[in-house]
Amino acid sequence: MPENKPVIGISWEPKLPQLSFGTKKNSNEVPGASAVYKPSSELMDGLFVPPNDPKKVNKLLRKQIKDTTGKNWFDMPSPTITPELKRDLQLLKLRGAMDPKRHYKKSGSKSKTLPKYFQVGTVIEPASEYYSGRLTKKERKTTLTEELLSDRKLGEYRKRKVREIEERNRPGGVDKWKNRGPQSRKRAKQRRH
């Protein structure tokens, strides 16, 4: 004879609807309910129950797959773009304007869109470059932007270029002495008489 033992603690079982994978359409579907969002009237005891329709199930599964480059590129994930990363990528696109001595090949895409898939790494110098090509601790920065802004030579080059552009665009001489074609001749006649 089985004994009914008293239940210690709380016991709970969800009330699940019967799943049917038929092609029958329900006429009592709530408008505005999608595969991801369910109104509170469709939740069972406050829990999300997967939809009955296999097409909706497949759509949910596709949304859960991580966005990667594929097997040929070792499933490299697309990183979340932070403001710092965005600034660094924009600097890499404009690297041709940074240094007058270096010339880079033009980028294949002329669009201003940032790449979707990329990875950021850290360069580690070998022990043989301890005295030659190594950055000191003061010169090392967290982002590429900070490193370029702290470079003294690059700052001097930028300032010199800005000065040259300003001098080129600055109006030369007094404005009233400029020859403006027939209008200036008329004014000269008026001054004479």
Image (tube, helix red, strand yellow):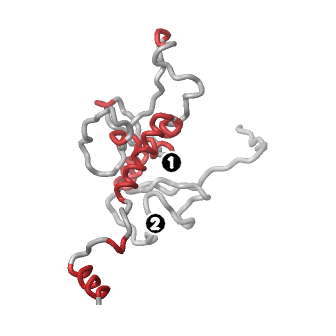
Location of the C terminus (image quadrant): bottom left
Query: In the rendered image of this protein, does residue 161 appear above or below residue 118?
Result: below
Q: Is residue 58 left or right of residue 83?
A: left
Please tell me which residue is depicted at 33% across the width and 72% down the height of the picture.
177
Compared to residue 126, the image places residue 143 above or below, namely below
Which residue in the structure is indicated by mark 1?
Answer: 83
Q: Nearer the viewer, residue 112 or 9?
A: 112
Q: CA distance from mark 1 to mark 2?
A: 35 Å
- Provide the residue designation for mark 2: 33
Give percent across and percent down for residue 184. 26, 79
Q: In the image, which is nearer the foreground, mark 1 or mark 2?
A: 1
Of residues 86 and 47, which is closer to you in this image? 86
Give x and y (percent) for residue 102: 32, 32
Specify the amino acid type for callout 1. Answer: Pro
Q: Secondary structure at mark 1?
A: helix
In the rendered structure, the answer to whether residue 164 lies left or right of residue 188 reads right
